[in-house]
Image (cartoon, helix red, strand yellow):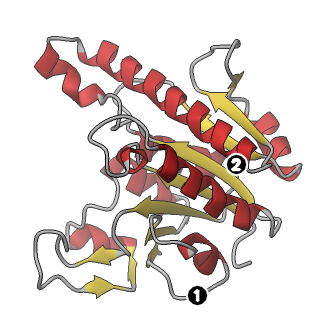
Amino acid sequence: MKYNRVLLKLSGEALMGEQQYGIDPSRLEQYAKEIKKVVDEKVEVAIVIGAGNIFRGMQAGRMGIDRVQGDHMGMLATVINGMALQSALEGEGVYTRLMSGIQMDQVCEPFIRRRAVRHLEKGRVVIFGAGTGNPYFTTDSAASLRAIEIDADVVLKGTRVDGIYTADPEKDPTATKIDELTFDEALSKNLKIMDLTAFTLCKENDLPIVVFDMNKPNNLYQLMSGEDVGTIVSL
């Protein structure tokens, strides 16, 4: 495999599948099977998942909810998604641990860096829930931070498109795919890959990002095998 330890970032919206809200069991099962393929090859996998399928902290203002309160609601929603993914992975025979940035001992472990690394070394998939544990930070930022903390080789950002394009391919038919670019090029072109905090963390710590289509069957395995999948951003 091309990488030994990876941080896989999944969006909450991806779990909706064809639904308008919540979790699609078939999409959950698909992701679990895809992750199992690389775990079976002895790749150490950590996962950060968003909560856009349940609640976004940014929605809070429109609902009359304080932003900090709203962000905490969003963090709790990521734990719900993490528990669902954990259950799906264990259904495939994959050993997992769910760790949270907010202490909730009855459902998951608190995030402790050394313990997380030890779980990975033992072949367990570690799912990081509750973001960074702090308001005003996105799950993209949590993914970058956790990847740096566990010394991951790369951040794999699973999306609905097969890489980075010159424009939104779902809106602009003339958009062309970019196979490789630097952090500085991405910034100068104002490409919306991750939020700026997350992107800067990766750049400053020389942590490459690969953007790829997680919904395409076998794509994750092919990427890990070194095939030309998605777009890589590096120094």
Looking at the picture, does residue 54 appear above or below residue 208? above
Query: In the image, what residue occupies the spot 11% across and 69% down?
Result: 171
- Left or right of 232 on screen, residue 147: right
Q: Is residue 220 visible?
A: yes
Res. 154 mark: none
Which image quadrant for residue 88?
top right
Which image quadrant for residue 62?
top left
Residue at the extreme right: 122
Tell me the amino acid under the disc marked 1.
Answer: Glu
Q: Which of marks 2 and 1 is nearer the N terminus?
A: 2
Residue 163 percent coordinates (x, y): 37, 75
Which image quadrant for residue 114?
top right
Query: In the image, what residue occupies the spot 54% across and 44% down?
Result: 48
- Left or right of 167 on screen, residue 207: right
Tell me the amino acid under the disc marked 2.
Answer: Ile
Res. 150 mark: 2
- Left or right of 159 on screen, residue 114: right
Looking at the picture, does residue 176 appear above or below residue 159? below
Q: Are marks 2 and 1 in contact (CB under 8 Å)?
A: no
Residue 192 percent coordinates (x, y): 25, 61
The residue identified by callout 1 is 227
Q: Nearer the viewer, residue 185 or 159?
A: 159
Q: Nearer the viewer, residue 82 or 57?
A: 82
Q: Can residue 132 be seen in this view?
A: no
Q: Nearer the viewer, residue 4 or 203?
A: 4
Query: In the image, what residue occupies the spot 58% across and 70% down?
Result: 220
Q: How many marks?
A: 2
Residue 170 percent coordinates (x, y): 18, 69
Indicate which label's residue lies in the foreground, 2 or 1.
Answer: 1
